[in-house]
Amino acid sequence: MLNRWLLLAVIVIVLDQTSKAAITSHFVYGESLAITSFFNLVLAHNTGAAFSFLSEAGGLQRWLFSIIAVVASAWIVWLLRKHQTEKLFSLALAFILGGALGNLIDRIAYGYVVDFLDFHAAGYHFAAFNVADSAITCGAALLIWDGIRGKKHASTVS
């Protein structure tokens, strides 16, 4: 069962890296293409964390976030091994693992994370993101859902 969750994480990594390769081969840094009235493809580089947090930290953040990703990934693999029969929990962890490793590959290879999905409305642009970020966000939402569901289940059993 553990292999199923690790395979899912690998699929997330492949989708993430393939999409980033496609964007970087067709766009130059900063280039944008309007797809709809609320969505653009754009080639952006994020040297920080989510929402460019610490992007101006002078390069140290590259290694800080890389170390955090490696430690978190090791912990997630341990959790997957321990809880592999808990489907929703493991699904969430597999998404987070794949996303963390997808962005880690960028950080190590380039010193930044490639972002390209740009949603906007009324002149406001949400921070550009990528497939790995989406997987991490979905995984986090599933963890919350699993936690809420578990509490509901526990309260109906008592």
Image (spheres, grey):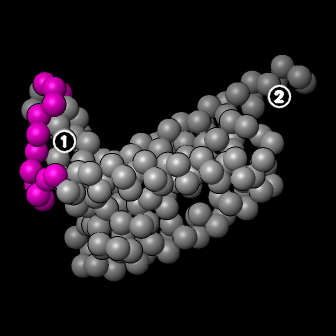
Magenta highlight on residue 31: yes
* Label 1 SS: strand
User: In the figure, 74 relative to 6: above or below?
Assistant: below
User: In the figure, 152 relative to 77: above or below?
Assistant: above
Q: Residue at point 51% right, 66% down?
A: 69
Q: Is residue 95 left or right of residue 107?
A: right
Front residue of this view, candidates 157 and 22: 22
The number of callouts visible is: 2
Q: Which amino acid does label 2 sit on?
A: Ala
For mark 2, what is the residue? 154
Looking at the image, can residue 124 be seen? no
Q: What residue type is labelled 1?
A: Leu
Q: Residue at point 89% right, 22% down?
A: 157
Q: Locate the C terminus and report the quarter of the image it occupies.
A: top right
Magenta highlight on residue 124: no
Residue 29, percent from left and from top = 12, 59
Mark 2: give few (<14), some (14-19) or many (20+) Cα within 10 Å. Answer: few
Residue 50, percent from left and from top = 35, 54
Taking the view exactly as shown, the residue that stands out farthest to the right is 158
Mark 1: give few (<14), some (14-19) or many (20+) Cα within 10 Å. Answer: some
Residue 96, percent from left and from top = 54, 50
Q: How far apart are marks 1 and 2 (CA)?
A: 44 Å
Mark 1 or mark 2, whichever is nearer to me: 1
Residue 26, percent from left and from top = 16, 52
Q: In this view, does 145 lie to the left or right of 63?
A: right
Span of residues in magenta: 26-38
Q: Is residue 75 left or right of residue 15?
A: right
Quadrant of residue 66 within the rendered picture: bottom left
Which circle's residue, 1 or 2, is located before the other in the chain? 1
Quadrant of residue 37 within the rendered picture: top left
For mark 1, what is the residue? 41
